[in-house]
Every structure is written in C-alpha cells, then in structure tokens.
Image (spheres, rainbow, N blue to C red):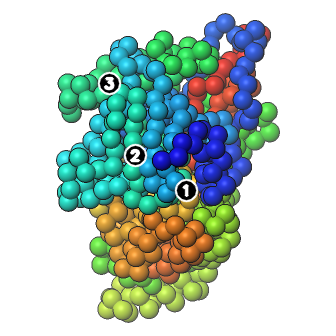
Amino acid sequence: MVRKRLIPVLAVVTVISLLLTACGGLGPSGATGPKKKSLDKKQVLNMTFPAEPPSLDSAVTTDVTSFDILNNVMEGLYRLDKDNRPEPAIATGVDISDDKKTYTFHLRDAKWSDDKPVTAQDFEYAWKRALNPKTKGEYAKIFYAIRNAKAYNTGKVSANEVGIQAVDDKTLRVELEDPIPYFLSLTTFALYLPQRKDIVEKYGSKYATEPEYMVYNGPFNLSEWKHEQRLILEKSDTYWDRHTVSLTKVNFDIVKETNTGANLYTTGQTDITQLDSELAEAFKKSPEFLPVSGSAVHYLQFNTSNNFFSNKKIRKAISYAIDREALVKVLKNGSKPAYGLVPPSIVNSDNKNFRKQVGDGHQYNPAEAQRLLKEGMKELEIEELPSEIRLLSYDDYRKDAAIVIQEQLKTNLGFNVLIDPQPFKQKLELEANGQFQISFAGWSADYNDPMTFLDIFVSDGAFNRGNWSNKQYDQLIQQSMGNKEYKARAKDLVKAETILNEEVPIAPLYYAGTVYLQKQYVKELVRHPVGSGLSLKWTYIDGKEK
C-alpha cells in the first residue's frame, strides 16, 4: 500500500472525475473564518424549517429534512467544505492503495457530547448496522460500493465478511468492490455518520427520537425537540473544532405555511424563511431575496402495479400533456423545466455534462398525448377513463404545482385528478407501501454523479416506489457500478437514462429552485447542492445589533 496524504488524494479524485463538487457551488468561498471583533455578542440564529424530521437515526433516515439536522449535530470521516469539496472531519486523512480499492482512514482525537472518544469502532458499528437486513434501512444501497456490503444487506454473507474494519480505535480500513471516483464524497453523506453501540442498544426503538436518546459529535447538540413545532441546537463544548463555530444557538421553528414564515420574518421573529411562488413574486426586489439552485429534480412517479399505469403509452401520454414551462412560471422560485431525470449540474464520469449528452426527453405536445392515451387504452382493452386519479402530493408550497398538473391533465387528457396532500412523513410511508397511483416526488443528489439518480430505478431498488422493472436498464446500472473504464461507463449511463425516457416510469417535471428571505447580517451559511444539505458550522451573525 502506497501512502497518499490528504492533498494528493483529493487531487487524484478531482482530476479523475470532477465528481466531488457540484457545478456552480452555492456556498461562499474562502478558507478564512470571520474576524472575531466583527461578531455580534449574541450569536443566535432563528430559522423556519419546512417539516418535522421523520428520523434522526442515520442508519435509516432517507430525507433531506433529517439530513439538514444531522449534518449539524453529527460529523463523519469527511464533511463538505464551503466550496462543496470533501475535507477531513473526524478523519485527519486517508491512505489509498495503488489499486484504489482500499481506503485506510486515520481518526483524530474527537469526543462525543458525553465526553467519550469517537472511535473507528463507532463507524464500523454504524455502517454495518445500516446494512443489517434487520434494520430495514431503505438507503443501504449507498454502501454497496464496499466489498460484500450488498451481499450482507441481502442476507448472503455475515457482517464479518463486509469490507469495513476498525483496525484499532483510530484506524478504519474500508475495502471496495471496485474503484469508484467519488468514495470520499460518499463519506460526507448522512448514512456514513458514526453511532455509539451502547447508546443505540440502550434506547432501542426510542433511539434518536428525542434529544436525550442520542449522543452527538458534531458542531452542535440537539437540546430541544418539540415535535411538529420546534428544534433547538446549541453549540457543542466537546466538538473537536468548536473554536471555528460562532453560533451559540440555532432555533428551528417548524413552519409549513410560507405565509406564516413570511410574517415571522417581517416582524423580526426569524432570520431566514422559505418562500412560495406568490411570496417570491412579492419579495423579489428585496435585497434579502435569496434564490438557491441545487441538484434536485421533481417528477411524477407512476405506480406500474396499477393496471392503468402499467401501460407505457398512457404514462408517456401524461408526460406529453404537461407544460413544464407553465409549471415553473407558477412556482416562481428559480426552478427550471426538466425534460430528463438527471439535473444539468451533474457531471458524467467522462467529465462531460450528462444532461447535454442525453438531450431532452418529452416536450409538451397535447395532440401526441391524446394519441398515445387512445393507443394505450386500446392495448388495455378499456374504453373509459378511470372515474378519478389520485395524485399523492406534498402538503406544502408544492401544492401550487400539483394544482397546475391537475388542470393540465384535465384540459389535455380529460382526467379527473384528485390531489391528495399529505404531511411529509405520511407521504413517505404511503410511497414506501405502494399506496398511490401517481406520486409527486423528488430526489436530491447525494453526490455528483448520474448514478445518484439512475440507481433509484433498478428493479430491486428501495426507492423504486412505482415497482417498474427493465432488465436492460438493470444490466447497464450494474455494470456501471464497478466499471473502471470511465468513458465506457459514461456511455452506459446515457443509455440508461434513454431507457427511462422511453419507458416512462417517471415523468420529470422541474429541476428545483428554492427562494428564501435571509437577513443580510447572517453570514457564511452554506447550502450544499449535493449530499448533506445545510451547514451551520461557519455561520455567524454580524450587524443585527447595530
């Protein structure tokens, strides 16, 4: 094994793939922190938060809401820096073998919130727990690059055969099935966080459901969690890099209605809030108006187990019936029409823009939509449309988009669409149980590679909610998992999305933008376009007291 310290490692990974950072990163650049003399004495940040985090158990969580909290109360081997590149966190660095398949991480002296040391065993335990079939973690696939991870997760080998080993308290060895160009980026992701075995086993099913039922190793501790109302983070006094952290407290008020958030903002009760389309239009000239683009896509997911939506032509008809340009005009939040699954910010493994390689999919064409609907119904041997079609939707500002879709499908295809808005947690449960006909869904990039989107729809994928299956698609994804020839891999991934466009298990709608109101005295708040979401480690307040 050849020892490669931090800087050479990052250089190698970046040169090979350019996959460690999203195009046009959202975070402020620069390595220097704030000048201490400029800080307000009261370093308290108030924010609205769009939903209750469904779970803070990193072994099973799947949603960006939970990721935002976890990224601030926990820390993995690496974390994304201000420029969205992996930087050492609990690890001080890594050695990579010549064949790029063995990573040996070296841990720094770090502590949990109860003053116990963070060890390599905490990482081994957490990762293997996430992979354990009994855990039933839907996101376990994020570990499949590791040797025997999939085999263990599917019950074919024991935990001891997985390529994750704590050599000693300060050394973690990870063996991959095949070299992948983005593994360091994966270690910044929420499921790669450590967990304490004694704490998890002590609280069992209660683990991570209340602040006192977990321990923390990140910049902040969760001090209060009043469910469906508020979360409060307080600066950790045991965090290894606590001198970098300026905020002493962060108040997250769970506010689902954007009008309420705007009222809190304009009356000075919160420093940051999210806007919907109507409010975005009202505040767009404000110097505190902040549009943010990332690497997320929203789409309609069809339940192909439903007889009506088992027909490809009917699914395609719905896609052709949607005017995406009109849809984003209603949203007014910087979203862009999506004519394919993978967002334009994602780079392929040949270092080329993936979206340009595939091209656009279904354009708005009502006449073609009507023709396809008739052909599809003829193939199913049915003459009448369903009496109603239920569209499972979010219960937040995205209801506006659902209404546009409802109107367009009525106008262009004659569908009677009933919108079924559900709270976030309940919506996820209904999707997981296949209790929907069409779901208004979305996905954010975990890392900068098309695979983070494309592997969702393999036949046995935990997030393939619509139960779609295609053997050629599965083969292309499988061979791309460990393909060392990055140009050939890039071509296979392009073929895979082309199959999605043809088979239409989903109808892409828009690449999501988000608009916030953010006080100008809030400095260095970083929103990552991929992976871990919100970072408050570097945030500080400067000028609120003036």
| For discs 1 and 2, the disc positioned in front in the rendered view | 2
Which residue is pictured at 63% across the width and 58% down the height? 16
| Nearer to us in this view, 190 or 377 | 190
> Which residue bears the numbered disc 2?
174
**Pointer 2: residues within 10 angstroms few (<14), some, or many (20+)?**
some
**Displayed quadrant of residue 286:** top right
Q: Is residue 167 above or below residue 521?
A: below
List x then y, in percent, for residue 78: 52, 36
**What residue is at 27 percent from the left and 41 percent from the top?**
129
Q: Is residue 243 left or right of residue 518?
A: left
Q: x, y (%) of residue 42? A: 63, 9
Instruction: Say which mark, if any, is on residue 214.
Output: 3
Q: Give the secondary structure at mark 1.
A: loop
Question: Residue 232's x, y, as percent?
Answer: 46, 20
Give, as a three-letter code, the residue at label 1: Pro
Q: At 26% from the left edge and 54% from the top edge, which residue is drawn?
A: 153
SS at badge 3: loop
Q: Is tag 2's residue or tag 3's residue first in the polypeptide sequence?
A: 2
Give the residue drawn at x 53%, y 46%.
2
* Residue type pointed to by label 3: Met
Give the mark, 1 or 2, whose residue is nearer the N terminus. 2
Give the mark, 3 or 1, whose residue is nearer the N terminus. 1
Q: Give yes or no for contact between labels 1 and 2 (Cβ–Cβ under 8 Å).
A: no
Can the viewer see residue 85 in this picture?
yes
Q: Name the image quarter holding residue 248.
A: top right
Q: Picture coordinates of residue 112 (x, y %)?
A: 39, 20
State whether residue 155 is above or below residue 506. above
Which disc is residue 264 wearing? none
Depth order, front residue of 474/117: 117
Label 3 to label 1: alpha-carbon separation: 33 Å
Mark 3 touching mark 1, by CB under 8 A? no
- Residue identifier under label 1: 181
